[in-house]
Image (cartoon, rainbow, N blue to C red):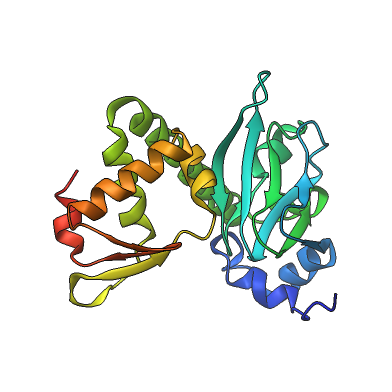
Amino acid sequence: MKHPPIKVQAFLANLPMFSEMRAEELDRVAAATLPVYAEKGQAVCQTGDPCTGFHVVVYGEVKLGFTSPQGVEKVVEIVRPGQSFGEALMFLDKPYIVFAQALSDAMLLHVARHAVLAELGRDTGFALRMLSGLSRRLHGLVRDVEAYTLRSSHERVIGYLLAEAPDGAAGGAAELRLTPGKSVIASRLNMTPEHFSRILHELANAGLIEIQGRTVRIPDLARLRGGG
């Protein structure tokens, strides 16, 4: 398969952690960055693999998860374009505790650990921006724990739909696609696919959403927001 070319420096410059870097600094990081291509369903990394850097998604979607001793898969995060994973383990010099698998044909950039550590030694601002990103990830994990323990399953589904709605949706309406697939989203929300589908149909019967295949239309965002 022929892959479209990408200017690594330009892509990295658009990421918050690299946005204030000078051209020569970006050049050094880009020199230690390699493209990774994965077809739908292909593993990007496995649990226990050494973490030699971190990944940034250029296009496609990647799920992070683990498999229980009983063989049940739990999705902990869906990583989308412009988002990254692996930074914390890279700093800890620990192997991956989750697997990463492409949900669609995807391109990622693997930024080598040695390049990141070298820039951290040169630029304290870069260190602060990386810490900010890690803090947002931790905040997100805390919100997940709160959702699983304090919110009902209906509230979790409504929260997911609202979070996935496009910014600035016109007229209070929005349309979104369940691109990761219902089973992946259900695992992310800590419920079975059957339970997730049942809640979607209940919301549809209540007139809060309209479903056509993987497309969900929200006629009134404010009404859905109050429907939990």
Please give the name of the residue rendered at 77% of the width and 48% of the height, measured from the top-left corner: 43
The image quarter in which residue 122 lies: bottom right
Drawn side of residue 41 relative to residue 78, left or right: right
> Foreground: 58 or 68?
68
- Residue 225, given in percent of the width and then of the height, sits at 19, 52
8 up-or-down from 94: above or below: below
Q: How many marks?
A: 0
Q: Residue at x 50, y 43 (%)?
A: 137
Q: Eyeballing the image, is 4 above or below 42?
A: below
| Residue at 24 percent of width and 50 percent of height | 203
- x, y (%) of residue 192? 46, 34
Direction from residue 55 to residue 80 in the image, left or right: left
Q: Position of residue 202 (x, y in %)?
A: 25, 46
Instruction: Name the quadrant of the N terminus.
Output: bottom right
Of 17 and 148, which appears nearest the observer? 148
Where residue 197 sits in the image (x, y, percent)? 39, 45
Quarter of the image where the C terminus is located: top left
Q: Quadrant of residue 23?
A: bottom right
Residue 126, by quadrant, is: bottom right
Q: Is residue 94 above or below residue 213?
A: above
Residue at 81% from the left image edge and 44% from the top image edge: 52
Task: Give the side of residue 201 with respect to residue 55, left or right.
Answer: left
